[in-house]
Amino acid sequence: HAVAVTPPWLEPLHARPSWMHERQSRRFMARPVCWNESFDAAFLGVVTEAEVLGSGFGGVVRAGIVGEHQIASKELHRDDEDEELFKEVYVGLLVPASPYMGFAQTSEGAPRLISARLPETVAEFLARAVWPFDVRVQLAIGMLEAVEQVAHLGLVHCDIKPSNFMLDEKLNVYIIDFGAVTLEGGLPPMSCQLYAPPDQIVTLSWEVFSMGRVFSEIFDVDVAQATRTAEDTAAPLDKLVPRMCSGLVSERPSLHECLSVLRVQQHVSMLR
């Protein structure tokens, strides 16, 4: 049996890792991976903010500059000492498919979550055109893989929606916005109701339901009728997506099964 580990943001203040107290030094948090010296030097100092890129329940996101690098800077609608800041930083540092670099401070000392600035969200990408089936499958697989990386930490994102996935120029998928992250077995947080299941307890199945809702949009699957509404939607997805969106946890497939079905569809589309 795996031993449950208390996340740092739930530890008493005196027991938290030293990097959680770095906010006073106006330094970025470094990921626990090897970065080169030029990267480390570039991401130190104070963030200069510019125009608003977007806003939501969690805070306002602005364009910004640190050194010579363009970044995205998230202002939190929370107290400066709120541990929610550290929850987002902690998860962002540990998930490879996250663009978060850590945090910085404004010249006035206000804390900011800092991330790489990526071109667009999955929601924006999908709104630009009717993309071929193979492109949509590629996106779907990337989104599931990103969700799996959060799950490997024993955490549930709990706010899955197209606007919480970012894309780079090569269509690599990144997951963002960890403000609603919950431990498995916890109570449901406040999150986007359109994609949230009716579950009373948070499990990984929560993510499956939310991804099913997202996939019903990406692949034009009528969940209520479980019938095909787009000519190029593969039949296996017509069966998978309604199962993902089931109101009963016991009827939903695992993240692994969902990935397996999509990878088969990707292989089939490549052979056409």
Image (cartoon, grey):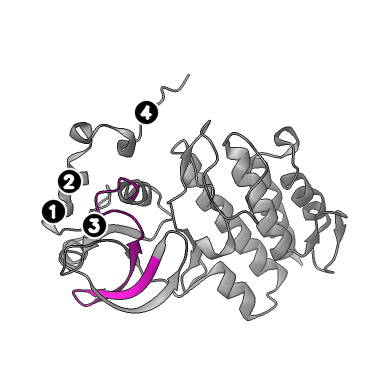
Tag 1–tag 2 contact (CB < 8 Å) = yes
- Above or below, comparing residue 54 to residue 103 in the picture: below
> According to the image, label 4 marks what residue?
5
CA–CA distance in space, label 1 to label 2? 7 Å
Question: Residue at 64% across / 45% down in the picture?
Answer: 208
Residue at the extreme left of the image, as rendered: 25
Judge whether residue 167 is colored magenta: no
CA–CA distance in space, label 3 to label 4? 27 Å
Q: Amino acid at mark 1?
A: Gln
CA–CA distance in space, label 1 to label 3? 23 Å
- Does label 4 or label 2 sit earlier along the sequence? 4
The range drawn in magenta is 60-84
Q: Secondary structure at mark 1?
A: helix
Question: Residue at 58% across / 38% down in the picture?
Answer: 204
> According to the image, label 1 marks what residue?
24
> According to the image, label 3 marks what residue?
35
Mark closer to the observer (4, 2): 2
CA–CA distance in space, label 4 to label 2? 20 Å
Q: Amino acid at mark 2?
A: His
Q: Amino acid at mark 4?
A: Val
Q: Position of residue 251 (x, y in %)?
A: 76, 36
Q: Is residue 101 left or right of residue 61?
A: left
Quarter of the figure with residue 160:
bottom right
- Does label 2 or label 3 sit earlier along the sequence? 2
